[in-house]
Image: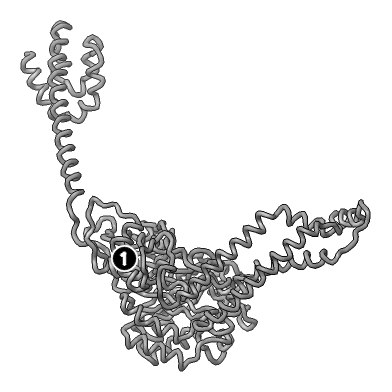
Amino acid sequence: MWTEAVQLRDDYLVLHLVQLLSYFVETTCLSPSEYTPKRFTHFLPLVTQDDSKSNMQYSAIMRSIKIKFFVLTFSLLTIYLFLFYFFLEKWINRKHETAGLSSVVLKHVVVHLDLKGAPPRLSYLESLLPVFKYYGVNGLLMEYEDMFPYEGNLVNLSSRNCYDKNELKKFLNKSVLMGIEIIPLIQTFGHMEHALKLQEFKNLREVAKFPDSICPSKAGSIQLVKEMLTQVINFHTSIIPLHHFHIGCDEVYHIDKCDKCRHRNLTRIELFSKHALMVETVVHQLSPQITVLMWDDMLRGRKGMLLSNMDIANIEPVYWDYKPHLSVSHPDLLNYHRKFKDIWIASAYKGADGVTATTPDFKKRFNNHLAWLNFILDYKFGGETEVYNFKGIILTGWSRYSHMDPLCELLPASIPSLVINLILIQTLRKGVVINVAETLDSDDFFSKYIQAEFNMRFKCRNMIYVDDFDNAECSYENMEIHNELKQYNTFFRKIKDKLLSDEAILTSIDYHSQIGYINMNTAQVYLTWCKDNLKKLSNFEEKFRYLMSVYYEKDVVDEYVTSITYDVTKKVLNLLKIMKQHLKTVTWDRRPSPRNVTMILNYV
């Protein structure tokens, strides 16, 4: 009977192996006396329900079962460890093998030209076209803002130094002849300061105090947007049919704030999508074959169901991220993939390192592009086996963070940053063979795949490092403007450091100058220092104005030079004024100074 029971138990062990594993520790630690038939009734029916023998016989059977169970478990663990180390060895060996050709598929490589308030001379932009073409650029995203030559009711939208229509047509024609597509960008929701700042359009603001966001619920807003689109699209299609048109729509900071919008009883995203649909409809009425692009940030974080209900499927979103380490949302991308036919990505070669930056952070810009290309390499959406190919990349180059902000990096000073990243994209579009065992950081990747071409383009004599681009080793057109800005940055930092390091002394001077006491030797030292540095500032301004005039009109030159020198010049001039005033003093009154009491009373 017990032999049959043991045989049946062996069969039962096979059927309930998973359950027994969970009890392994318990069954190997408890003594036989602790077992009761009731304890294992659910998987020892024959053993526990028909047992009429002695406790000793029962213990012997349980020991036999435990030994068999131990042997089985040990065997399974041995097989598991063998397979684990077998595949681990295969993986380690594979690290020493060479991977196949790695490449990215990007149909469109587009350079963004941000023209707002600071248009480069068209002759200069024309000189860049062969460089763009050589490095695989097949599109220019022209963000006109106030540089487009509007007419009629919209004439005041244009800056007084906007492009001449005939000259602009000439440039656009040359671009098209070189196989470079023109993609106009007109802001139609947020970032509309160039229109809403004006008296005639201020009533169209979503919030009266802020001229950046237009109210999507006013008839005048729709009319303004329609007229802008009509003039821009008709102008371009008179040259060549447009294939793409960018409607902006990023950073709409004020939405659903005014009474008209709130009375529509729509959510913010519903208001946004309806306005975007209206803009898309206008574009297609003017030119049906155009594909509409739109910055994606206002769509981020939306639930898939909510996004799927929006009637904007014919728009193509452009997912932008300008950081060296991306924070791209996979759920957002998946939602876009389900909703839209194509997705674009956007990086930054300039205009992403601070409002007052004068030159791009070379390494950050390179790492941003490298991160994007690494991200899209062999990208697959969850549940899909095929690699997804993003439609294109837009290399953004912002001139201002907004219409009201100062100019940041100039285009001529940013050409090395633009070219290195175009080389990077071109290299990965062609494909590179990467050893799987390699863990290439940005420096290694630059040295191995980019440096030779970069050195040839910029005629660099020695090794160039992506960590700190030193163009002193190179010789190329536009390098003077880059050199001057680097030298000015060094000079500017020295003045700031001097003022900061001597802050206690300068504070003391400021205070004692108010009460009429000041050390004349100290005053003389600072007077000389102020004069010397004002002379250096003047020399820089004179030289830099001359260099900039090759690329920009006088108005832009004046604005930029004044903006980058204003703060430091003001501080030095203020200090000089104090020193001059008190060096005139030849006699002093007895202490205490009567002005002490006056100062205290004024302060209180």
Residue 550 against residue 330 in the figure, above or below: below
Q: Can residue 302 be seen in the rendering of this structure?
A: no
Q: Position of residue 273 (x, y in %)?
A: 45, 70
Closest to the observer: 527 or 379? 527
Label 1, residues with CA under 10 Å away: few <14, some 14-19, many ≥20: some
Residue 541 against residue 382 in the figure, above or below: below
Where is residue 376, by image quadrant? bottom left
Q: Is residue 452 left or right of residue 518?
A: left
In the rendered image, the quadrant that contains the N terminus is: top left
Kind of residue indicated by mark 1: Ile
Q: Is residue 312 left or right of residue 431?
A: right
Closest to the observer: 270 or 65? 65
Residue 101 against residue 415 in the figure, above or below: above
Mark 1 — residue?
450
Q: Position of residue 132 (x, y in %)?
A: 35, 78
Q: Which residue lies at the image location 53% right of the left edge and 86% below the top edge? A: 162
Q: Position of residue 368 (x, y in %)?
A: 40, 62
Q: Which residue lies at the image location 25% right of the left edge and 16% below the top edge? A: 29
In the rendered image, the quadrant that contains the C terminus is: bottom right
